[in-house]
Amino acid sequence: MIVWWLFVGWVVERAQMSMSFIPSAFNGYGCIDEVNRRKTVAPMCYRVLVPWLVWLIERIPWARGRRLTLVYEPFRIVTIGLALWATAQAFGPTTALLTAVLLPLTFLFDYWDWAVELFAIVAALTGQLWLALIGAVLLASSRETAPLVAVAYWLTTGDWQGTIAVGALTALTMLGVRLWAGEKTLNCDRLMWSHNRKDVRALFDNRPFYLSETAIALVITALTLAAIATGVVGWPIAALILISGWIMARAAETRVFVVCLPWCAQFLLNTGGFK
């Protein structure tokens, strides 16, 4: 079954690469070497999973110079596939398929961490401790939302011992990454609400406005709030992602709301009369 989801991941990544693969020194493929040299700014300096994987694999002589084809793209295909597989375990295969359909709404820049985030948090929602522990390590070395893995596991299981284990592993991994990278300057304001408010006010300056990033962020927000109102399982996670996305991130960079998509998909399926 995982192989089937890897195929879907390949399809999604084909779309993502076509739409958003523009190497930049500030994110994704373009900042791998700067992260490994510890010369890039926060938060990318703490997103070390792919840069470290590239460094490790390139120690193999025949792998040098093949990071895009041998490491970066296979990593993205596998993590997208695993994220959708985990979504199928937690929400059902139909919800996972609709999540895959919704994913292109979030494609704008070249980032790999969103798929790790989706996998880790949704894997914790399956209630399987081993998946939550794996997700905790992967996300703690990929994105600042890693503590939500422990929250998701607790919401699903109520298992305090397992939750403490997931939380402790998350904290240790994040601490290790911080000690390795050192303190860096943040590349944007810590609080982004004022920027997001300006984007919303300028919504109709976009042509066409209904296809703009801000419009997409508003649609995802509305669907997520509607899903939360129905009391779906794990809704506090979606609420936290929504709040942090509007207050601490640029909402128009809609990848910050990727984790909300399974709840959006679940709501659409429920209201559309699908089983």
Image (cartoon, helix red, strand yellow):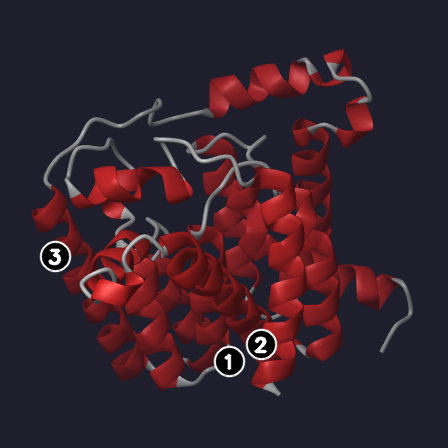
Circle 1 sits in a helix, a strand or a loop, which is it? loop
Camera-near label (1 vs 3) is 3
Tell me if I can see residue 4 in this picture.
Answer: yes
Q: Which residue is pictured at 52% across the width and 73% down the height?
A: 82
**Residue at 9 percent of width and 49 percent of height:** 180
Amino acid tagged 2? Trp
Q: How many angstroms separate mark 1 from mark 3 (CA)?
A: 27 Å
Residue 5 position (above or below residue 151)? below
Q: Secondary structure at mark 3?
A: helix
Q: State how far apart marks 3 and 2 are (Cα).
A: 29 Å
State left or right for residue 256 relative to residue 136: right
Does 3 sit above or below residue 174?
below
Give coordinates of residue 38: x percent, y percent.
15, 39
Residue 246 pos. (x, y %): 52, 34
The quarter of the picture where the N terminus appears is: bottom right
Callout 1–callout 3 Cβ contact below 8 Å = no
Outermost right residue? 273
Please give the residue where the numbered disc 3 appears in the rendered image: 176
Give the amino acid at mark 1. Thr
The reply to whether the C-beta atoms of the residues labelled 3 and 2 are less than 8 Å apart is no
* Image position, residue 245 (x, y; %): 50, 39
Q: Is residue 248 left or right of residue 183?
A: right
The residue beneath circle 1 is 126
Residue at screen point 67% across, 63% down: 11
Say which mark, if any, is on residue 85.
2
Q: CA distance from mark 1 to mark 2?
A: 11 Å
* Residue situated in front as seen by the camera: 273 or 225: 273
Which residue is nearer to you in this view: 3 or 145?
Answer: 3
